Amino acid sequence: MASSAQEQHHHFPDMYGATSAPPPTPSAVPAAAGTDSAAAADDFLSRLIHRLPPALSLPSRLCPTTTNNKPNSAAAAPAAISNVSYSDERDDSFFENLSSASSAGFFQMTGHPISSKLARSAESESLALFDLPLDQKELCFPKNWPFGYERDEDDDRLGEWFCLDSLCSCSSESSELKLESLRELALAMEKVGCEIIEWMSRAIGFENPVKADPTRVCSLMWMSKGCSDEGRETAVMPGGFYPFVVGLSYQIRTQKYSLLADSGTVTVSPEVGSLMVAIGDIAQVWSNGKLKKVRGRPVACGEGNGSKPSSTLTMSLLLSLPLESTVSPLLPLQKVIVHDQDDVDQEDGEEGEEGEETINASDKEKVMFRSFSFEDYAWRVYHERLVISSPKDPLDRYRITTNS
């Protein structure tokens, strides 16, 4: 299972060594054929920035702090959110419903096996972590990107956050911390998340690498505490974005969330007791663009009562990839058409061995994304926080466009 601590240590650097190593350097990936010079220059600049000393950082004053600037009085009502029942997996209509629900980039899942008692207990343990003195937070959860404890020293509204593996590992100095419920919740959501990936791959039609090799994904338990703007219900994104396949958040109480979907910023209020499922950028690439996505983690919105900023806690389990991964569309090989490849006349379809399904040329599809280094991409979107309010999709640099 992807939750194995031993497996994850093969994918990420040791979090708690005697000395803190600088962030890993992305591997140099040669530009794909047809990549324009601007994209190549951006990739070079990204790798150059990645090699800066870890003490240096991008100026936070350039980073927008909210995803929406509308005052509370003009705040839009929560958008409708589709529902998928975990217990209906054996029904004939399940995959059709899942495909339809996935068209927005997010949906809620009911009937799942995770109890509200476990979620509330895990929330209490999370809040206890934020109540620790600053020096103890930094000692118990040393920063080792993407894991550890971080806070924004320049803007209090950006808050603070912990990023842990699915076993909620911490340093030896934190042996007295109680994290059993948080660990159990992370593992339970990880299991459901892997099932969702399998179901989506069957509903949409792409290969699922997790089914054959669970170590192809790894989990991050992301707990963030930020503030809503004074007099507004807008959400503030604590920390940078981190790429993921799917993200799950348990709805403990009636709560609005802010999401940056492909269609723009939306506010949703999932049913109490449900899991809010966000489809990530990696899933969109795997599906060759069929799936819509959410950019970044869902963020809980505060009440915005006009008196003072309200603190909000968000707990999300992100199923992501090991840093050394390469990201590319995962279409069945017989359905792939390489760009610039001459059309082949196959009026009667492709003839396979007896019993194999034949694929008509009209059923094939062109690859919409070029392959790219996950580590380079993750580092870029995590640190380039200008993307929060930018209409530009960070995946655009990897899209393959054809001249009409």
Image: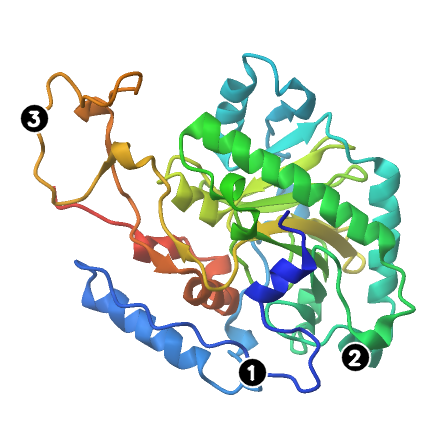
Left or right of 170, for residue 124: right
Q: Amino acid at mark 3?
A: Asp
Residue drawn at x 53%, y 27% is: 101
Left or right of 340, for residue 73: right
Tell me the residue that label 1 is attached to: 22
> SS of the residue at dot 1?
loop
Q: CA distance from mark 2 to mark 1?
A: 17 Å
Q: Give coordinates of residue 46: x percent, y percent.
A: 38, 73
Left or right of 46, for residue 85: right
Residue drawn at x 51%, y 50% is: 295
Q: Nearer the viewer, residue 108 or 59?
A: 108
Decide if residue 256 is in sight here: no
Answer few, some or many: residues within 10 Å of disc 1's Cα (few below 14, many 20 plus, some between 14 and 19). some
Q: Give coordinates of residue 115: x percent, y percent.
A: 83, 35
Tell me the residue that label 3 is attached to: 345
State the count of labels: 3
Q: CA distance from mark 3 to mark 1?
A: 54 Å
Q: Are marks 2 and 3 in contact (CB under 8 Å)?
A: no
Q: Nearer the viewer, mark 2 or mark 3?
A: 3
Q: CA distance from mark 2 to mark 3?
A: 64 Å
Q: Quadrant of residue 150?
A: bottom right
> SS of the residue at dot 3?
loop
Earlier residue among tags 3 and 1 = 1
Q: Amino acid at mark 2?
A: Leu
Q: Quadrant of residue 111?
A: top right
Q: Is residue 7 above or below residue 259?
A: below
Determine the residue located farthest toward the right in the rendered image: 176
